[in-house]
């Protein structure tokens, strides 16, 4: 019988994941990348909408330009694609800078990123390798064992993610 392997998601951690709309996969990228992701997701709705509108407008305008250039001179289409790629890059760069500024303003985001990383991917390793099961047993009592037994899927031999 293969060994049971799981990451346990405690209620406080689950609330943070839901608050920022992120998944366990996002946490695996490390605390700094997670901090950037949290900052990007916490940008004001107005600013986020402005970036969305700018992206859509850019794509629409580039498509129109490419279409007209193709009728004028097909050799210019590649130049238009290159120019469009550069414009997208600059807009993405500005978005990243705005997310970074938001991150620097919010120490809370940094603490949340660190909390999530330490809870779900401590020391950049699997939780089960870094956190002893006894710590969960001490926090949740003997009922924890029954809860764990009921939550685990015995027919699944892959790593599982279990919410407590």
Image: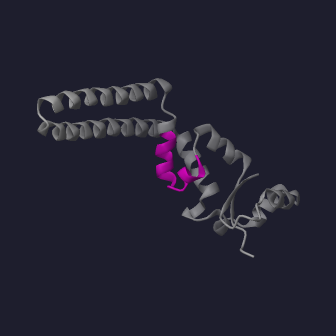
Where does residue 49 sit, x and y in percent of width and height? 44, 25
On screen, residue 100 above or below 67: below
Magenta span main SS: helix
Which residue is located at x 32 percent, y 31 percent?
Answer: 59
Left or right: where 14 falls relative to 58: right
Where residue 8 appears, x then y in whole percent? 71, 57
Q: Tell me where residue 69 appears, x and y as whole percent.
A: 16, 30
- Taking the magenta stretch, the answer to whether it contains residue 81 is no
Given residues 86 and 114, the one toward you in this image is 86
Q: Is residue 73 left or right of residue 18?
A: left
Residue depicted at x 69% and y 62%: 6
Residue at 51% in and 48% down: 34
Where residue 19 sits, quadrant-wise, is top right
Q: Is residue 43 above or below residue 82?
A: above
- For the view shown, which residue lies furthest in the bottom direction? 1
Q: Which colour scheme is used?
A: one colour
Q: In this view, does 91 lie above or below 46?
A: below
User: For the magenta stretch, what is the residue range?
Assistant: 23-39
Which quarter of the rendering shows the N terminus? bottom right
Count of numbered circles in the view: 0
Q: In which quarter of the image is residue 159?
A: bottom right
Q: Does the magenta stretch include residue 29?
A: yes
Residue at image location 71% in from the left, 64% down from the top: 156
Q: Provide residue 119's location: percent of width, then percent of height.
A: 64, 55
Q: Quadrant of residue 147?
A: bottom right
Can you name the residue that lies furthest to the front here?
A: 71
């Amino acid at each position: 019988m293969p060994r049971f392997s799981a990451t346990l998601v405690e209620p406080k951690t689950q609330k943070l994941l839901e608050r920022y709309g992120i998944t366990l996969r996002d946490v695996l990228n490390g605390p700094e990348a997670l901090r950037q992701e949290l900052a990007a997701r916490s940008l004001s709705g107005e600013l986020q909408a402005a970036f969305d509108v700018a992206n859509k407008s850019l794509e629409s305008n580039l498509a129109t330009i490419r279409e007209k250039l193709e009728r004028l001179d097909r050799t210019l289409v590649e130049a238009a694609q290159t120019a469009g790629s550069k414009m997208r890059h600059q807009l993405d760069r500005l978005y990243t800078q705005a997310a970074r500024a938001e991150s620097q303003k919010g120490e809370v985001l940094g603490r949340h990123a660190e909390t999530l990383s330490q809870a779900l991917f401590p020391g950049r390793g699997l939780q089960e390798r870094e956190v002893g099961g006894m710590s969960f047993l001490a926090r949740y009592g003997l009922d924890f064992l029954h809860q764990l037994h009921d939550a685990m899927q015995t027919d699944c031999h892959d790593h599982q993610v279990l919410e407590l």
